[in-house]
Image (cartoon, rainbow, N blue to C red):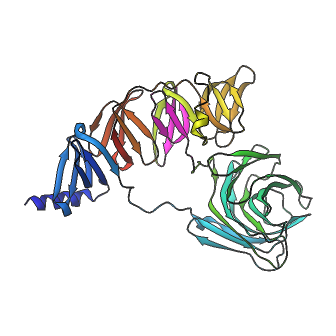
């Protein structure tokens, strides 16, 4: 009868409301099984070991949860179309392998008044941006190119703005201002592949960014170039020499509005030392809304010490003046300013020297400092699968949810499917 009860509990725990975890209790006992949260605490069940135990949270030392079940998210490559732009000795192609796109082209590239390359593209509106990692590219010729483009149409003489790599490790921005007109090129040191590239539309033009790791971005170009409201944004590859195919592999290619930084999601460090991870999507009534996936939460701005939008070495962060409010720009400059508001595409600050300014948090800003963090002693640390770190004075359990008392926010509820670890400090 006892074993039947365990089997019934395990069957129920196999639903989406339970997680597999390793649990360490006071006294050193270690258990692994299906874990549910109830008002009594943790319920651990393992039929193979004839285990069914209720553990009060006061007796919990550590819990480490397996990653949530389900297939990893993949980029939707079905929205991409392909075309040979201009004449090419051999047709170009694209091979889809999961989230990767291998683009091949024998076109000569961006020369004179007409172009010749292979283009993997989709429609993009007036506020769109495109980002991708260039994983590898072939060195077919010194004039070969591989990168991103936003183009008015698919004719060889169309106007466009592009950001690309050369086989010699240089990056370049290219633009054609008049249909059939010459191409203007500007180069910058890029270090070759692998690297990340991003183009973003702004009113009347474009901004280009380069990154080695996809987390910290560097502004490499800006162009005033008013184009049509709807463009074709995509991946452009050319060989530079007839008869040879340049095969370039891209990953994480996305087109959208204010795309989230997948390599380093934005985060807010609270004055208590906790860290909220998610995109800031709104600012209303003195609180900032953060979103991850389909879920969101609101955090009072008075509880936030700093907002970080791009990765920076921890040692470098430790050198920041703790009491100086302002904005650290991605180029390393510091702007002394007061925080005003933020959403997914704009950071608004006010400066004595520069007045009111609006900045792009997805590219221009490393972080904004609001006040000094003053962590208080905590008894527990809870981490989530999204990267949040919660410092808690106490824990309680509900129906498959953990309720923690956070020093700056009070009661915070974390669903069981968000949990990564629970640790007593």
Q: Quadrant of residue 122?
A: bottom right
- Residue found at the far left of this picture: 1
Instruction: Report the residue at 80% width, 77% height from top.
Output: 244
Q: Is residue 263 magenta?
A: no
Q: Quadrant of residue 350?
A: top right
x then y, percent, for residue 179: 88, 59
When the figure is inspected, residue 193 is found, relative to residue 412, above or below; the finding is below
What's the magenta region? 264-293
x then y, percent, for residue 73: 50, 60
The quadrant of the picture occupied by the C terminus is: top left
Residue nearest the viewer, comparing 187 with 14 = 187
Residue nearest the viewer, comparing 325 with 321 = 321
Determine the main secondary structure of the stretch shown in magenta: strand
x then y, percent, for residue 143: 85, 66
When the figure is inspected, residue 418 is found, relative to residue 367, above or below; the finding is below
- Residue found at the far top of this picture: 352
Instruction: Report the residue at 13% width, 58% height from top.
Output: 5
Question: Is 425 on the left-hand or right-hand side of 278?
Answer: left
Instruction: Report the residue at 19% width, 41% height from top.
Output: 40
x then y, percent, for residue 54: 18, 46
The quadrant of the picture occupied by the N terminus is: bottom left
Q: Is residue 285 magenta?
A: yes
Number of dots carrying numbers: 0
When the figure is inspected, residue 163 is found, relative to residue 143, above or below; the finding is above
Residue nearest the viewer, comparing 33 with 261 = 33
Question: Is 129 on the left-hand or right-hand side of 270?
Answer: right
């Amino acid at each position: 009868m006892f074993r039947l009860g365990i089997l019934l509990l395990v069957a129920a725990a196999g639903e989406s409301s339970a997680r597999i975890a390793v649990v360490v209790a006071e006294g050193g006992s270690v258990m692994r099984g299906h874990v549910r949260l109830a008002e009594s605490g943790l319920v651990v069940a393992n039929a193979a070991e004839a285990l069914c135990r209720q553990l009060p949270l006061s007796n919990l030392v550590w819990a480490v949860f397996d990653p949530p079940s389900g297939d990893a998210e993949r980029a939707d490559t079905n929205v991409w179309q392909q075309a040979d732009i201009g004449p090419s000795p051999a047709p170009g192609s694209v091979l889809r392998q999961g989230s990767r796109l291998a683009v091949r082209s024998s076109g000569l590239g961006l020369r004179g008044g007409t172009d010749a390359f292979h283009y993997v593209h989709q429609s993009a509106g007036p506020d769109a941006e495109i980002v991708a990692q260039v994983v590898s590219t072939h060195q077919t010729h010194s004039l070969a190119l591989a990168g991103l483009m936003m183009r008015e149409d698919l004719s060889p003489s169309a106007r466009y703005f592009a950001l690309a790599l050369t086989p010699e490790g240089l990056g370049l921005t290219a633009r054609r201002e008049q249909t059939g007109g010459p191409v203007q090129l500007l180069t910058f040191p890029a270090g070759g592949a692998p690297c990340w590239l991003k183009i973003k539309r702004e009113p009347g033009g474009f901004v280009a960014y380069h990154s080695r790791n996809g987390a910290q971005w560097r502004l490499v170009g800006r162009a005033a170039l008013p184009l049509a409201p709807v463009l074709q944004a995509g991946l452009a590859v050319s060989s530079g020499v007839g008869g040879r195919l340049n095969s370039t592999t891209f990953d994480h290619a996305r087109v959208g509005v204010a795309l989230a930084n997948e390599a380093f999601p934005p985060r807010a460090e609270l004055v208590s030392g906790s860290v909220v991870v998610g995109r800031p999507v709104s600012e209303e009534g003195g609180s900032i809304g953060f979103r991850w996936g389909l879920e969101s939460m609101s955090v009072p701005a008075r509880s936030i010490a700093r907002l970080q939008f791009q990765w920076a070495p921890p040692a470098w962060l430790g050198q920041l003046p703790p009491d100086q409010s302002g904005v650290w720009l991605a180029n390393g400059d510091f702007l002394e300013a007061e925080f005003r508001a933020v959403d997914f595409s704009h950071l608004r600050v006010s400066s004595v020297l520069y007045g009111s300014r609006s900045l792009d948090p997805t590219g221009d800003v490393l972080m904004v400092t609001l006040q000094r963090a003053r962590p208080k002693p905590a008894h527990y640390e809870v981490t989530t699968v999204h990267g949040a770190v919660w410092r808690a004075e106490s824990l309680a359990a509900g129906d498959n949810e953990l309720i923690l008392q956070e020093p700056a926010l009070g009661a915070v509820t974390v669903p069981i499917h968000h949990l990564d670890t629970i640790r007593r400090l």
